[in-house]
Image (spheres, helix red, strand yellow):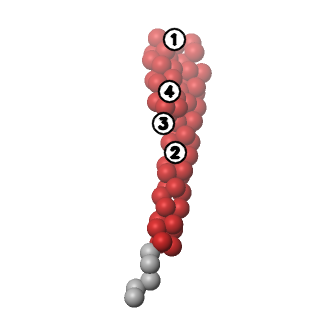
Amino acid sequence: MENVRRYRALASLCRQQAAYRPLQNWQLLGQAEHFEHLAEIALKAHFDACNAQREEEDIAAAQEVPAAA
């Protein structure tokens, strides 16, 4: 999650710089979009890992349930 914050902060800085540098506007906005894309990838990977871990825990819990007597 720390990487997501860093990527979004970098994207924000690029957008701010684009406002003050009209000659590099498109380049900076392209970099901002790239950092936002990296943030989305990192966020998706984090939640996929969390969901996979939870599924494994659910499977393990289901296997531990004793049979009814």
Mark 3 and mark 2 residues within 8 Å of each other at the beta carbon: yes
5 versus 42 height, above or below: above
56 versus 38 height, above or below: below
Mark 1 and mark 4 residues within 8 Å of each other at the beta carbon: no
Whole-percent x and y of residue 48? 53, 52
Mark in the foreground, 1 or 3? 3
Please tell me how crowded label 3 is: few (under 14), some (14-19), or many (20+) other residues with Cα within 10 Å. few
Mark yes or no: residue 8 visible. no
Instruction: Give the spatial CA distance, label 1 vs label 2.
Output: 35 Å
The foreground one among 46 and 31 is 46
22 versus 10 height, above or below: above
Query: What's the residue type where badge 2 is placed?
Result: His
Earlier-in-chain disc, 1 versus 4: 4
Residue position marked by numbered label 2 in the rendering: 46
Quick one: which residue is furthest to the left in this view? 69
Query: What's the residue type where badge 4 is placed?
Result: Arg
Instruction: Kindly state the secondary structure of the residue where label 1 is placed.
Output: loop
Mark yes or no: residue 53 visible. yes
Instruction: Kindly state the secondary structure of the residue where label 2 is placed.
Output: helix
Please tell me how crowded label 1 is: few (under 14), some (14-19), or many (20+) other residues with Cα within 10 Å. few
Whole-percent x and y of residue 56? 53, 62
Mark in the foreground, 4 or 2? 2
Mark in the foreground, 3 or 4? 3
Earlier-in-chain disc, 3 versus 2: 3
Instruction: Kindly state the secondary structure of the residue where label 4 is placed.
Output: helix
Residue position marked by numbered label 1 in the rendering: 21
Residue position marked by numbered label 4 in the rendering: 6
Instruction: Give the spatial CA distance, label 1 vs label 3.
Output: 30 Å
